[in-house]
Amino acid sequence: MTEAHGIVPQLLHRSLEQIVGQPLRAIFPIPRVEEFINGFRQVLASGVAREMEYPILFGTIDATWIWQRATPVAGTLVVDIRDLTAQRRAEVRQAAADQQFDILFKHSPLPIILHAPDGRITDANQAFATLVGDTRQSIETKRIQEFLDEPVGIPASGEPVRRLLTLADESRHPVVLHIDQLPHGYSLVAIRDVSANEELERVRTHSDLALRESEARFRSAFEQAGNGMALLSPAGQVIGVNLALASMLGYDLDAAHALTWRDVLHPDEHDSVAINLARVSRGEAESTRAERRGVHRDGSTVWMQVTVSGVRTGTGAPAHLLAHIEDITERKRLSAALRDSEEQLRLALTVTRDGIWDYRIPEGRSYTSPVFRTMLGYAPDLGFTQDDFIALVHPDDRQRVVDTQQRHITVPQMDPYDIEFRILRADGGYAWIRSRGQVVERDPRGQALRMIGTHSDVSERRILEEQFRQAQKMEAVGKLAGGVAHDFNNLLTTITATTELLMQDLRPDDPHRDDVLDIALAADRAKTLTRQLLSFSRQEVERLVVVELDAVVERVRPLLQRLVAAEQQLVVQATAPNAWVECDPGQFELALLNLVANARDAMPDGGAVTVRTDVVVLRPDDLLALPQLSPGRFVTVSVRDTGLGMSEEVQRHLFEPFFTTKPQGKGTGLGLAIIYGFIERMHGAVLVRSAPNEGSSFTLYLPAVAVPSVSRHDTPATTRAVSRGQERRVLIVDDEATLRRTTRRLLERKGYQVVEAGNADEAIAVLDAAPVGSIHIVLTDQAMPGRTGRQLVQEVSMRFPDIRSILMSGYTGDHAVRKALGGSDGETTFLPKPFTIDELTAALEA
């Protein structure tokens, strides 16, 4: 550049010295500077002046816009320069403002129109078109007065103008017009729809009224509520209480307002109440509900159901807390009483082991308590329908149960339902149940809806009743036995004695000897049967003697053979010779007869019964199965069959009185009980081995005793009697002349002198008349007219102490006989009828 002046240095931010002489590229920081220089070259080449505008950049300084005119003059360029920066910035701002106005106008949510001086709408935004329900194009052909209820002018003060705006549906909305004046008479009108505000104001006014009414209703409900109520601050301070709460706690209303919630709650409730109040106050819980103990003014406890909820006036945490308090003291008392009653009922049912049942009749549902189910051995949670229950009833009782229940259900005035029946247990057996109940609910037509009651297990009572009936039967048998035993045994005594006399008189080859022997055997069997009858009735007195067991077994073998059936076999193995025991032979024979009879019944299809005797030595290890015994030597008798066998359950009850597995009428259930009692009294034991379908074995253990040094079997009493009989005189006292005569013949056959008397008075008269020392023994019957034999024995003992007495009887149930057998006087000997010659002479020589 050759020369510069004016504003050039200022525009270029340089001094003249820095400009003159510098190339254009160094002076002008112009974008695309090469185009700038080429423009100068074109002016020089064409000789035509040229105007240009361009920006100059100086580092971070904003661009400076300049205008220049380049004029060629004599081969040089004269450049006029002017600063256009301010003008350009104003133009940019105006363009931006126009652009922003256009954007705001078109997209503003506020309805806006551009209003010409002649009243035409020259432009309208979409918000206005939407408000009036028209299109922008259609609106630009209309005047604003077409939309308003009255003309509008431009207010001098610029204040908003209120008008009614007509919409497309002909409805009118209140609007406020904000009018701004533009150049050349144009106006910009912004429209604000205030219909919503007016509606809001109307709603607000209505809400205020409703709020006041609500507050009035709340206050009325609060004060007049039947339950207690308290209004608390979020911090738990009492703001107000109602009269019901004050009365509940024993205060008047003024005194109650001065209380805090801690004053009226039990101390143990304070911590948990404080926690719950805080949770509701913080908005962590909408409400809390709990049973609380309150303190009455008199110090008593008031149980309360307390519900605390938040009262919100807006969003966020509650502004107040409202407590609803219900007095549940009576309910708690009744609940406690009900629990006590239920507990008492439960304990009573537990003690009595009664089960409860509840029959819902229309549905056929039947509830039974766990006690009843376990009573029968079923699972406690097993469910029963009514049909299930009826199916468990014994078939023989089922129809009776159904009919009785139906009559009670059908007839409203029926007596309480009370019936006993058998029901199936889980183990397959039957229990006796007493079922009692009552219809407790009927519909208006009288139809039964519900029936409840109890089940009681009366099996034990039924067993006892059955045992009692059996005992009564046995008592009757005993009385019958006692009634006939005397006469029957008198007859047997005559038969036995007579046959013995005949047997002594008959030659060994006499053809009638066998006939007489059969009579003797029959009499012996009759004697055994009589003893069995008395033993069953508990009127047989045990007479302990030392006997050889094999001999007893052999003696009873013929009777055992008669017990077994034709298709059954009896095997007797007497393999314990010279084995002696102390027992009552009659009781032992009876035990053996019972065991063989049971074995026979256990083999309905035939089989074998084996009776075997043995001698065993029990050691400590052998006593596991026989804990009641002690180590030592025992004589055993076993009865083994090949019959049906027994289950373990049956074996557990074998020796219980009246227990039997035989059909009705086939057994008394006393046989094994008698055996067990007899063996136990002999200090022995019974061992049973059995299994279903494997037969049974009963083994009797009796303590072995030493062999007697002198036995009456070895030294017959007849021999001793003959040597002393000539020196002795016997007074026979009996009201049976036949028996006196037979007994006299027996004694005379043995060498005794005999005197007779028919009763006690005759006997005393004979003794009074006889010389002193001429009568040595009084042999008297017990049952006689007038005084008994026992009374006679007592008088003889007092008046004639040197005379020995022997008491005879065919009935051992008499108390006097038992007393005599007890040896209370030490002199009386008992001789049971019927007796043999050997037994008679043994008693005389005892």
Image (cartoon, rainbow, N blue to C red):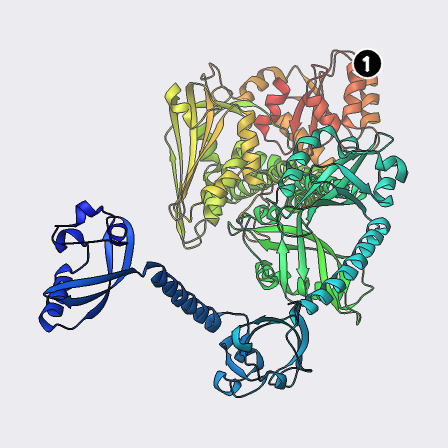
Residue 40's place in the image compared with 460, above or below, is below
Residue 81 as seen in the image, left or right of residue 779: left
Q: Nearer the viewer, residue 32 or 398?
A: 32
Residue at image location 84% in from the left, 50% down from the top: 226
Residue 809 as seen in the image, left or right of residue 678: right
Residue 384 as seen in the image, left or right of residue 36: right
Instruction: Kindly give the residue lying farthest to the front in the view shown.
Output: 74
Position of the N terminus, as image quadrant, is bottom left
- Residue 770 location (% of width, % of height): 80, 17
- Residue 107 location (% of width, % of height): 46, 71
Q: Nearer the viewer, residue 494 or 625?
A: 625
Q: Is residue 593 visible?
A: no
Q: Nearer the viewer, residue 422 or 89?
A: 89
Residue 512's place in the image compared with 410, above or below, is above
Dot 1 alpha-carbon crowd within 10 angstroms: few under 14, some 14 to 19, many 20 or more: few
Residue at image location 78% in from the left, 35% down from the top: 294
Task: Give the residue type at disc 1.
Answer: Arg
Image quadrant of residue 363?
bottom right
Task: Kindly state the secondary structure of the residue where label 1 is placed.
Answer: helix
- Residue 384 location (% of width, % of height): 58, 58
Residue at image location 67% in from the left, 24% down from the top: 830
Q: Nearer the viewer, residue 816 or 118?
A: 118
- The residue beneath circle 1 is 799
Image quadrant of residue 815?
top right
